[in-house]
Image (cartoon, rainbow, N blue to C red):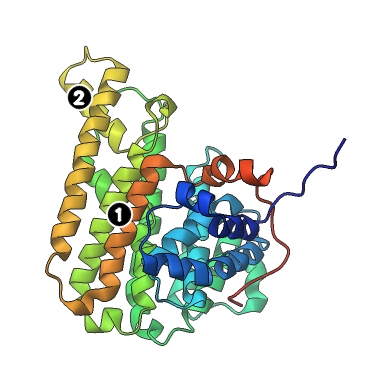
Amino acid sequence: MSAQRRAALPSEQLRLLLTDEALSANLLPAMTDEERRALDYMGEAVVEDAQRWSLRSSLLDSKLLIPVTLINVVLSPHSSPEAVATRVRLSLWVYALDDLFEADSTEFDTLRRVVSECLSVSAGPLPAAGGAAALTEYGTLLRDICNNLAHHASWTASQPLWTGLLVRLLDGMLYEYWLQRRYAAGGCPDVVPPFDEYLFHATHSVGVPLIWGTSLATAPGAFASLPVARSLALLDKCGIVVRLANDLATPLTAYDGRTVDAIRLQAWTVQSRDPSVTHHEALTAGKATVSKLKEAALADLVRFMHGAPAAWGPESRLVRATQLVVDFYGEHDCRSWMLTSLTPALGSSPRRADSGGVVE
């Protein structure tokens, strides 16, 4: 019997993806020549950095490394590998935080502590490394990210706005935490939570405004030279589109008693108007409504950027990355894409790294 094949590192998987023309044609999303050159140039180094960083905590999911790197390269193909690597770290942290908030076993006291220390870490002054024992893993990882962000020349001016985006992320996740528990029974409630209320919070809990905003915060003069209100409005519009696309990616068969999202809220609205509608019929109608809302939100985002001045270069990348994420959600799940797409070619799933990196 032959020995079992060693599991491939995500960086090795990416190398295969970039060098095998057939795999690239079948698996990579549609990319411009500029974006593909940027991925060829920095992709492997960024993934290697994330591999090494993920060793610091079991909270970080290595299956996300390649899709998250693809998205962040497209978000700013002219950024340095170090800047992209920091955003990839942030993306992994957001996923880990989302897992904590969504876990059935998570108590509110745990969330209270994590939220409090994340706000403290982000607002500065940053805790000294020697004080790491006092932080949870989430706070320690965020401190690493903030330390890297502080190396950018634009960070001093951008930090207050970035911290505001982090507050909205945490607020949105807390809202969803309580929403899921308030309606855990799953039946149509007497009073359906307002859809606009959900979207206000869930636009930020999806993480896009914070991650896209980090791209602006580290771009030379982006927040300083452009209208802040317009930039924040753009981040909100991107977040709305991705939130709706994210909810649409949930198959109807996956809805259980605790899942409350855009589709469930629209389904409850249908049932509140006509109690004779079945659960499946309501979900189907809700999904159709959310699909129309997503297309309208995407069209609104494109209109918002139409005719924008040339100085809005970094902002135009936000729209492009949003469209890429929407297309990706329509075909893949970020957590399973690597396993279903590249495992047959490599013979194994990703393993955790033991070396390599860009950002210290």
Residue indicated by mark 2: 270
The outermost residue toward the right is: 1
Q: Amino acid at mark 2?
A: Val
Q: Nearer the viewer, residue 182 or 151?
A: 151
Q: Position of residue 116 (x, y in %)?
A: 47, 63
Q: Position of residue 133 (x, y in %)?
A: 67, 68
**How many angstroms separate mark 1 from mark 2 (CA)?**
29 Å
Q: Nearer the viewer, residue 35 or 58?
A: 35
- For disc 2, the neighbor class at 10 Å (few under 14, some 14 to 19, many from 20) is many
248 left or right of 17? Answer: left
Does residue 179 sit above or below 252 in this rendering?
below
Q: Earlier in the sequence, mark 1 or mark 2?
A: 2
Q: Quadrant of residue 170?
A: bottom left
Q: Nearer the viewer, residue 21 or 232?
A: 21
- For disc 1, the neighbor class at 10 Å (few under 14, some 14 to 19, many from 20) is some
Q: Position of residue 155 (x, y in %)?
A: 40, 82
Residue at screen point 50% across, 64% down: 88
Could one spot residue 85 in this view of the protein?
Answer: no
Disc number placed over residue 323 in the picture, else none:
1
Instruction: Please state, as top left, top right, bottom left or bottom right, where the N terminus lies in the image.
Output: top right
Could one spot residue 270 in this view of the protein?
Answer: yes
Looking at the rendered structure, the secondary structure element under dot 1 is helix
Mark 1 touching mark 2, by CB under 8 A? no
Q: How many marks?
A: 2
Q: Amino acid at mark 1?
A: Gln
